[in-house]
Every structure is written in structure tokens, then in C-alpha cells.
Amino acid sequence: MDFKNIIFDLGGVVLNLDYHKTTRAFEALGLTDFNSMYSQAAQTGLFDLFEKGLCSTPYFINALLNFLPSGTSANKLVAAWNAMILDFPKENLELLKELKSTHRTFLLSNTNDIHVQAVYRALQAVSAEKTL
């Protein structure tokens, strides 16, 4: 079969993720039931809104801060939220480059503004490429 187009998912396919790291990071901040709010299998409305682009980053952060102990900073929340983002294996990036030269490639993902920024930083850590 000859394929002209290839669609990739970002998280867990091109980019390594560990959802448990985010759960542990939020638990360390004092949100002991985070896994009931967000996991790889399911998430509550706030996370759906954010990942669909239906609420702003400041709204998401402020809403989530309400579940954390008083005095928790937005920066600590963002670090916990990004804890799941690991790295881009170089072999994945090389495969994408190779396939891009012979196919139309597309990257789809249910992601959000905070994670997109972290993904770009993870990409820059292993590649001179600005985009995938």
C-alpha cells in the first residue's frame, strides 16, 4: 500500500509522557486526589475545557489553584502540570524527518497552551528544529 499522508499523535507516540509524574507532583503540592480529577483514562470538566481551548491558561491555573493549599504558586502548579512531559527520543525525530521527505506528515494532539510551551522546550533540548 502506498501512503501519501501520515498522521501522528504527539503524546506517547512522538513524545514520551508519564502521567504518573504529574499525579505525584500534584500530590507533593498537597492535592492528594488529583488522579480522580485527571488521568490518562479520564478527566474532569476543567481539564476538558482547557484541552479543547475553551478556557484560557490564566482561568485554568486560577481554577486549579483553588484545589491546592493556600500559598501554592502558579509556577509550582505549572511545573507539576508539565511533569508528565519527558523527552523526544532522537530516533522518533529522525523517523519524522525521513518520512517528511517522502510523505505529507501531520501531527495531531489534544494538548494545551502550557504543554505546548513545554513541548517546544523539550524539542529544543534535542534538536535545532523549531517545529516538528
Image (spheres, rainbow, N blue to C red):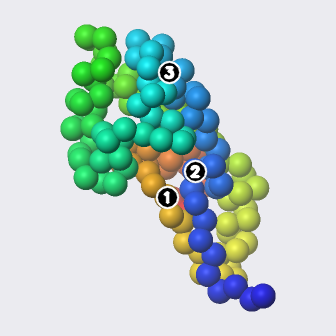
Q: Which image quarter is the C terminus in? A: bottom right
Where residue 10 sits in the image (x, y, percent)?
A: 57, 56
Asked whether residue 126 is in view, the answer is no
Q: Specify whether 85 is left or right of 71.
A: right
48 or 101: nearer the eye? 48
Contact (CB < 8 A) between labels 3 and 1? no
Quadrant hosting residue 114: top left
* Residue 71 visible: yes
Kindly check if marks 2 and 1 are in contact, taking CB atoms under 8 A apart as contact. yes
Query: Which residue bears the numbered disc 3?
Result: 25
Q: In the image, what residue occupies the spot 58% across and 60% down?
A: 9
- Spot occupied by residue 71 in the image (x, y as percentages of width and height): 26, 11
- The local secondary structure at tag 1 comes to loop
Whether pointer 3 and pointer 2 mark residues with C-beta atoms closer than 8 Å, the reply is no
Disc 3 from disc 2: Cα separation: 19 Å
The front one of 102 and 40 is: 40
Tell me, for residue 109, which label it has, or none. 1
Say which amino acid is labelled 3.
Answer: Ala
Residue 131 is situated, as x and y percent measured from the top left of the image, at 51, 61
**Residue 60 location in percent, x, y?**
27, 37
**Residue type of the residue flagged with mark 1:** Ser
| Location of residue 73 with respect to 82 vertically, above or below | above
Local SS, label 2: loop
Mark positioned earlier in the residue sequence (2 or 1): 2
Q: Which residue is mark 2?
A: 11
